[in-house]
Amino acid sequence: MRTIALRVWVVCWLILVWVLLWGTVSAANILSGLIVALVITLLLPLPPVPVEGKLHPLSLLRLVLTMAYYLVVSSIQVALLALRPGPPPLTAVLRVHIAVRSDLVLALAVNMINLTPGTIALEIDQARRMVYVHVLDVGSDRTVKRFYHQVATQQKLLVAAFERPEDWRPSADKVEEGEEVDTP
């Protein structure tokens, strides 16, 4: 049932995107959008993504609010760096460990880093859960500590929202492949 609901949602979303691209809501655009959506979903299906945890809505809300705060603060910091006279800020590539279990949550964490102004993930070591991030303004220990604190906070909120140990169920493909399963 969940799979069917997800497929219907994807088709509806693709129809909406099609209609928005054409700029006019008409029967022809909706019908052609349906045809395009069906062709895309049937001929180019996405691989299934294993969901190994459980979603906690209040923790997710906290994550979204915290991320919004970080986006505003980082945007102001980058704007001030761009406007201040003098030499450009010192930049560096920092390595950060993202201690999450799921590849999906690791992808979310990296996307959160990339969305934050002044940071961009350059490389992901998926096996060791290490991310190499180019960071703008590492001119003091305080700014470096602030970056690591921000990533640690995001990581805690991601675990609380998606990967609580009591809700963790490894996907069947990990068990079948014989990988070590990290259980609480």
Image (cartoon, rainbow, N blue to C red):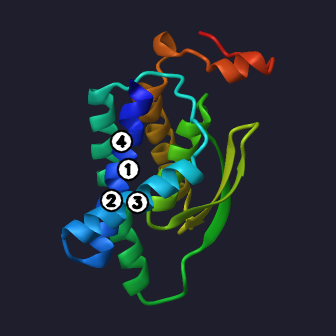
C-alpha distance separating marks 2 and 1: 6 Å
The furthest residue to the bottom = 85
Badge 4: few (under 14), some or many (20 or more) residues near its Cα, within 10 Å?
some
- Residue 15, numbered label: 2
Image height check: is 12 above or below 136?
Answer: above
Mark 1 or mark 3, which is nearer the start of the sequence?
1
Real-space Cα distance between discs 2 and 4?
Answer: 11 Å
Mark before the other along the chain sequence, 2 or 4: 4
Q: Secondary structure at mark 4?
A: helix
Q: Which residue is mark 1?
A: 11
Closer-to-camera residue (15/59): 15
Residue 175 placed where, x, y %?
A: 72, 16
Residue placed under numbered mark 3 in the picture: 35
What residue is shown with label 4? Answer: 8
The answer, for residue 180, to whether it is visible in the render is no
| Residue type pointed to by label 1 | Val
Quarter holding residue 58: top left
Mark pair 1, 4: CA separation: 5 Å
Q: CA distance from mark 2 to mark 3?
A: 9 Å
Question: How far separated are the C-alphas under marks 4 and 3?
Answer: 13 Å
Question: Of label 4 and label 3, which has the lower sequence position?
Answer: 4
